[in-house]
Amino acid sequence: MRIAHDPRMNAVLVKPRTEPKIPVDPSRPFRRKDGLASGFDPRRKRKEFRRLFHGIYVSRAVEVTPLLIAEAVVLSVDPLGAWASHATAARVWDLPIPPLPGEHVTVLRRSQRRGRPQISCHSAPDGLITKFDHVDVSAPAQVFVDLAALIPLVELVVVGDHMVRQGLVTTAELAEHGAMAKSPGAALARRAASLVRNGVDSPMETRLRLLIVLAGIPEPEVNALVGDETGRNKYDLSYRRSRTIIEYDGKHHVEREEQWESDLVRRERIDDDGWRILVFIAKDIFTSPARTLERIHRVLLQRGEPGVPRRLSDEWEQHFPDRS
């Protein structure tokens, strides 16, 4: 309290102490209580402010990006010792994850956990954390392990292949961090890490390769150079011993005439060298995987590829339901 004298009266006036206003940057997420301390209530100015989560606001003039959401998620708990994790961190790193509801934050101690709608709050005594711009987020190897509790094996390998392709992490780092992990999904993370490969160009190539591997067929080489000195080309998946190539043909190839013509020339040249090319599209993986496997299996047996079993494993059916 602050005491002041009124010169007009022989009395003492008692005035309440006013708290200093805390400046708020509305272009970044802020808590309602901080807005109130700055002299405004964002709930009363809905044309100016957007509510991101309960008690967390930002200016409507600002674009809502994954990084902005990550900052808001960290702000929803005690920012000291908290970081954006799981799917929230995956979206910050622009990883190819399936649609997942809600956001995620991790804190060091269980006592820091706070319940808030739309935000799952986890606790972990340690983790691989890095700065993305100005926000603390799980590092890529940590995101990989975190996601093992949220997505299935095939989609996790898709994420791992993408990470390695983009130079965010190495296969050795994924394996090393997975080996130390004790969090939910750690066993799945270790299995997925063992299936991540270098040089994979697209998620659909990953899915096609895993369809083959989970059926018990020997794993093909990824993006190997095939041909002689006069013309060497890179193919998605290949078996050198049986001279068999397996390719995924995406929609973008059809849309780009130049790419389509180049692929035709490339395939005709390799056909002349005695190679067999099998080309597949999305529906061969998502709709009729059984027929796709039957075709690959038959050709590899006919061409004498070593190690191909007479009977396929049933494991692929858990990950690629047949809808044909």
Image (tube, rainbow, N blue to C red):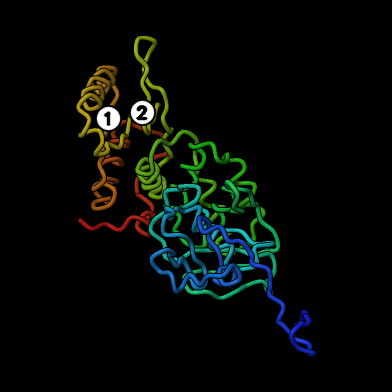
Quarter holding the C terminus is: bottom left
Q: Are marks 2 and 1 in contact (CB under 8 Å)?
A: yes
Q: Amino acid at mark 2?
A: Tyr
Q: Residues within 10 Å of mark 2 (few under 14, many from 20)?
A: some
Q: Which mark is residue 235?
A: 2
Give left or right: position of 200 versus 172. Answer: left
Labels in figure, total: 2
Residue 202, position in %: x, y?
A: 38, 39
Observer-nearest of 86 and 200: 86
Helix, strand or loop under label 1: strand
Q: Is residue 304 above or below residue 8?
A: above
Label 1, on which residue?
A: 277
Q: Amino acid at mark 1?
A: Ile
Q: Is any part of residue 274 visible from this angle?
A: yes
Helix, strand or loop under label 2: strand
Q: Is residue 222 above or below residue 323?
A: above
Q: Residue at x 50, y 46 (%)?
A: 160
